[in-house]
Amino acid sequence: MKNPLSSILNFFKNNKQPAQFSLDIDKLDNCILLAMLYISRNTTESGKYVYRSNTDVQTRYSDKQYSSLRHAGMLYSMYLCETLLGNTAIQNKRFAASEYFIKNYVKRVNSDMYGVVSKPFEEAPVLLATSGGTGLGLIALSNLLEENRISKTILQKMGNFLLFMQNEFGDFWPSYEFG
């Protein structure tokens, strides 16, 4: 399967740009790599991402709120960086962050469905499985299948949850309260 980000970059490489717009692919690659190294540095050994850090080490932020959707987005961006740049320097951090995500947020909704669940003390007052978190989580975790780091059944059951969340008009309900 062709990488969507490399398709976009190839488009810019092969097409003339408007005079006011210039894209230096090498600079873009470096910026992407620097962003991924920042994410890697701010991923704990357990795989949890530290969202805000300050150059002043005395400044501490509360970690009571945590976004499973952002974590899924981070996982996907780490994977895209690896595939686009062919750089696996952050792969172990991606694996740890994936394991953290699965352990803490991918939960059984019922016997046929898994969803990405927001913890009541972090994101919502009640236990919610969200369609956005599950959709992005499914995409972010799907690369783990070929690396034998996730069960195909879990991915299929995440897909079942998304089908369950789709209404008759094709829209998706945002969340499902359970538990």
Image (spheres, rainbow, N blue to C red):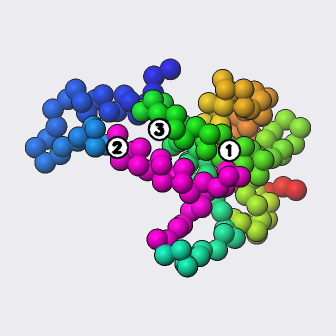
Q: Position of residue 162 (x, y in %)?
A: 69, 40
For the residues labelled 2 and 3, say whether their Cβ atoms are less than 8 Å apart.
no
Where is 125 relative to 113, above or below?
below
Name of the residue lying farthest toward the bottom:
58
Query: Which residue is at the front of the view, 78 or 177?
Result: 78
Instruction: Provide the residue span drawn in magenta.
Output: 29-55
Q: Nearer the viewer, residue 149 or 155?
A: 149
Q: Secondary structure at mark 1?
A: helix
Asked whether 21 falls inside the magenta stretch, the response is no
Q: Closer to the N terminus: mark 2 or mark 1?
A: 2
Q: Earlier in the sequence, mark 2 or mark 3?
A: 2
Give the class, few, some or many, for how many residues have Cα within 10 Å of label 2's Cα (few <14, many ≥20). few
Q: Which residue: 64% across, 55% down?
A: 44
> Along the horizontal axis of the image, is 24 left or right of 34?
left
Viewer-nearest residue: 56 or 80: 56
Where does label 3 land, which residue? 81
Mark yes or no: residue 166 visible. no
Q: Which residue corresponds to the image point at 49% horizontal and 71% vertical from the top-left?
A: 54
**Three-letter residue code for mark 1:** Ala
Image disc number at residue 30: 2
Looking at the picture, how far across and down is residue 176, in whole percent? 76, 53
